Image (cartoon, coloured by chain):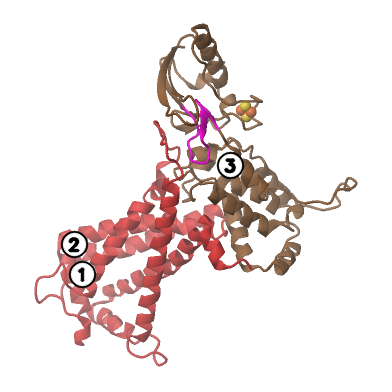
Chain colours: A red, B brown
Amino acid sequence: MTGVMTLYQTSIGKKVVMAVTGAILLGFVFVHMFGNLKIYSGPVALNEYAEQLRYLGKPIFGYEQLLWIARVVLLGAVVMHIVSAVQLTLQSNGSRPQPYNVNTRTQPAYRYASYTMRWGGVVLFLFIIFHLLHFTFGTVGYSSGQFVNPHSGVYEVYNNVVYGFLNPIVSIFYIAAMIALGLHIYHGTWSMFQTLGISSEKMSGMLRSFAAAFALVIALGNISIPIAVLMGILPLS
Amino acid sequence: MDLRLRIWRQKNKDTAGKLVTYELPDVSPDMSFLEMLDILNERLIEQGEEPVAFDHDCREGICGMCGLVINGVAHGPEVTTTCQLHMRHFKDGDTITIEPWRAKAFPVMKDLMVDRTSFERIIQAGGYVSVATGGTPDANAILISKESAEAAMDAAACIGCGACVAACPNGSAMLFTGAKIAHLSHLPQGQPERYDRARNMVEVMDAEGFGGCTNYGECAAVCPKEIKLDVIARMNGDLIKSTFLTSGTRKMGANATRTGK
Ligand code: FES
């Protein structure tokens, strides 16, 4: 056994880290999106869901215990994903000291996603910070009195979401970020299969379609919510 | 047809180069790209100027020596080697920019010639099978499934021209290294050294200063031998397995996969 650290020292090893942490994050965004859709079942369902989340893993785990474990794992995954991405980007940037005078891309436009991975990743990172300040802490994007922090014991998550998305600028930002997320997931999911050696000539077409479908489901599922709020389908309760 | 050529001229490794423009009238559409450059060189020599240095050997698309970035695309507008590209793909009055492969691991030696010994060092790290010498083995003594044979042959089509590196926005040599690893990884003869090979070749590839892979697919799009991205997945899989197999089980794993599946 040559060890995980020796693997990590290779460029492919860093990609394996990106693939594995990416898989964790993909699982998270899917569950997160699916949970969000409970908003269509009405205020009671969503508020209850928010409350139950804190008791996840009951009775083995106490109040918010499993939630905190998940948060630590997710934070670790995000950090490792970014560190590996930065290391790989630096390696690639050093590989061609003299650029081409004329540089033509041969790949069709649908591979656009692959060219937005790095900057798209930066956009998503900024989005995550905003998203936490917004819906988790309620420190940005609200007029006073609109946001009710669940730690007060009162679960008004439904209204928090509706108030948040009634601001059209915030909604547009979320929609743009979800488009960026969709592109990132499309190329990232397919790359994950490639990096882990799962892809092959027979399977690559199928895996690409799966990546596209997965990215679409997550992006559209999330985008539907600000649109529904702005269209008045999800009114304040 | 009349062409305007913008060609990278560089005296040697240590001097900076620049694009120089040449007018070249009366080019036949039936000429190959390299024949067109031969004509240019003849005229340069007549005028007492230094001819343009470029790599070539077989001019049949099989040796992998030639390679130019033509209007920003490795090997130019057709999926073939530069020597097999014909001037009928260009129009009268076209301006054609011709540059060498550009990568840290492929230093320019002169004009359009680059030093690709970094590829040789990757091969030396494991692109072979160790066999005991002796009599010629019997034909068909080792059975190979059609599937494995074809996958191995597809990967073995790589001529090591370096277009994959030249085209990759990351300057990555994954398609080349992947092809060499996949070729032997699909065959029974390659099994005993399969996982060490992947490890050793990838380490040398990184040390040579090539970039990482982000699956742009530019490499496979310009590859004159149409090597597919699957060879990279195969290499990745072999490298990951090398991490988790001890040398004993690595051999066992090798036996279990004698057919190269
Ligand atoms: S000169 Fe041999 S492949 Fe072009």
Which residue is tagged 2?
A170
Give the letter of the chain under mark 2: A
Magenta stretch: residue B70 in it? no
Q: Quadrant of residue B113?
A: top right
Q: Quadrant of residue B120?
A: top right
Residue type at numbered disc 1: His
Q: Magenta residues, as a range? A: B99-114
Residue type at numbered disc 3: Ser
Q: Is residue B161 left or right of residue A94?
A: right
A39 or A62: nearer the eye?
A: A62
**Marks 2 and 1: CB-CB under 8 Å?**
yes
Magenta stretch, main secondary structure class: loop
Q: Is residue B136 left or right of residue A141?
A: right
Residue type at numbered disc 2: Val
Numbered disc 1: secondary structure: helix
Numbered disc 2: secondary structure: helix
Tell me, for residue A79, which label it has, or none.
Answer: none
Instruction: Determine if residue B229 is in view.
Output: no
**Marks 3 and 1: CB-CB under 8 Å?**
no
What is the C-alpha distance between the residues marked 3 and 1?
51 Å
The quarter of the image holding the N terminus of chain A is bottom right
The spot of residue A183 in percent (x, y) is: 37, 54
Magenta stretch: residue B113 in it? yes
Which residue is tagged 3?
B118
The spot of residue A140 in percent (x, y) is: 16, 68
Seen at 60% across and 47% down, the residue is B177
Which residue is tagged 1?
A134
